[in-house]
Amino acid sequence: GAAGANLQLSAVAYAFAAFVFVKMATDTPLLAVVEPKRVEGDETPLDAMVSSRRKFLTRSGWLIAGVLAVGSVFQAVRSRVGPRVPIAGADRPYTGPPDDGDFPHIPGQAPEISSNDDFYNIDINIVKPSVDHETWRLKIGGLVDEPYELTFEQLQNDFEVVEIVHTLTCISNRVGGDLIDTAVWRGVRLRDVLERAGLRNGIVDLVFTGAEGYTDSIPVDKGLQDDTLVVFGMNGESLPREHGFPARIIVPGIYGMKNVKWLTAIEAVDTDYKGYWMVRGWSDTARIKTSSRFDLPTDSSRVQSGARLAGVAWAGDRGIRRVEVSTDGGKTWSEALLKRELSPITWRLWAAELERASGEVTILVRAIDGAGGRQEGEPTDPHPAGASGYHEIRVLVV
């Protein structure tokens, strides 16, 4: 997902620009709308002016709020009505590893695989692109021997179709945040698509372009890995519109802003290309940090001794080896129970119990990834390379 910019402000800016244009076109003084039409009672002209401007600002605020509310509803409805078209491999549904009988079912804990409707959705668009898959083309070019294009049908039929279970997270996700989810992604290897074109020597980056003009890039070596995909399916269905229909990039280990949606072009270049968020100061490497989160209990809740602690932990493409919790503010740590992993590129569910505690308790969680790296405890903001720090909650044990 793109870094968390409040793009609703753009709508306000457009509305104000339209207002100014109308006033100029009708030769109406711009400030006339905020000046008092008359002075009433014993108020002074200054009082009338202040009152008139206050009313104008109040009405403008309600108008802007109404426009944004209607726009949000329109966008929500429009994004959910995306096309559902047949996709390759639909006759071979995903089958994961056997369930973990030793791990308890805990109401309120995140599911291993998120539904399409619940999957977080962040990008730069106020209105999502609506792309016709029948006329859509994916262009492959740049430093290649034979540039070419793919139709939606060719993308699915000309290469081996593969599926991965992968956790995607936004670089603007804060410690303990919910801008993270897991899905079963169906597509073809980016490497196979590029090999047909024939990569030349000296390539540094692969640049992806979306239908709305959004661009980003990854190093060519990352693009040639087996699990970097051009994706057309999500949880057994064609991609929902809000998640990039008809095709997007999925790159394990890298924050969501580089997993470009509504993909229309792939270009091999000999430079370190800086995409939409990179030129705005965000990390070009964008390597997902080892992180963990409480799903329950919630902060400031009342619980009983022995209450269940549960959450998720993730580390991009490094997997999770261990999760630890502390019930004394970080002085000591104990190991949590981990559910078996769906794959090394997904989050893992963890659980523990709150034992031998009473009164106000500060609880922390941290993770150790599959490479042995421990989660960073020093708090940092999401900008420019993703948030770090331990998720901390305070509960009252009764």
Image (spheres, grey):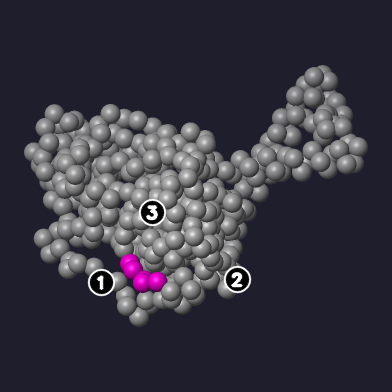
Instruction: Report the front residue among 143 and 220.
Output: 143
Q: Position of residue 301 (x, y in %)?
A: 27, 41
Residue at 59% over, 51% down: 213
Query: In the image, is residue 99 above or below residue 212?
Result: below
* Mark 2: amino acid: Thr
Residue 95's disc is 1
Q: Position of residue 181 (x, y in %)?
A: 35, 54
Q: Position of residue 42 (x, y in %)?
A: 82, 21
**Disc 1 to disc 2, C-alpha distance:** 33 Å
Q: Which residue is mark 3?
A: 223
Residue at 38% over, 40% down: 285
Labels 3, 2: front one: 3
Residue projecting furthest to the bottom: 91
Which is more N-terminal, label 1 or label 3?
1
Labels 3, 1: front one: 3
Which is more N-terminal, label 2 or label 1?
1
Labels 1, 2: front one: 2
**Disc 3 to disc 1, C-alpha distance:** 26 Å
Whether residue 202 is visible here, answered yes or no, is yes
Q: Residues within 10 Å of mark 3 (few under 14, many from 20)?
A: many
Please give the range of residues in magenta.
Answer: 159-163
Instruction: Report the front residue among 51 and 136.
Output: 136
Which is more N-terminal, label 2 or label 3?
2
Q: Which residue is mark 2?
A: 135
Residue at 66% over, 41% down: 12
Q: Secondary structure at mark 1?
A: loop
Residue 53 quadrant: top right
Is 386 inside the magenta-drawn segment?
A: no
* Mark 3: amino acid: Gly
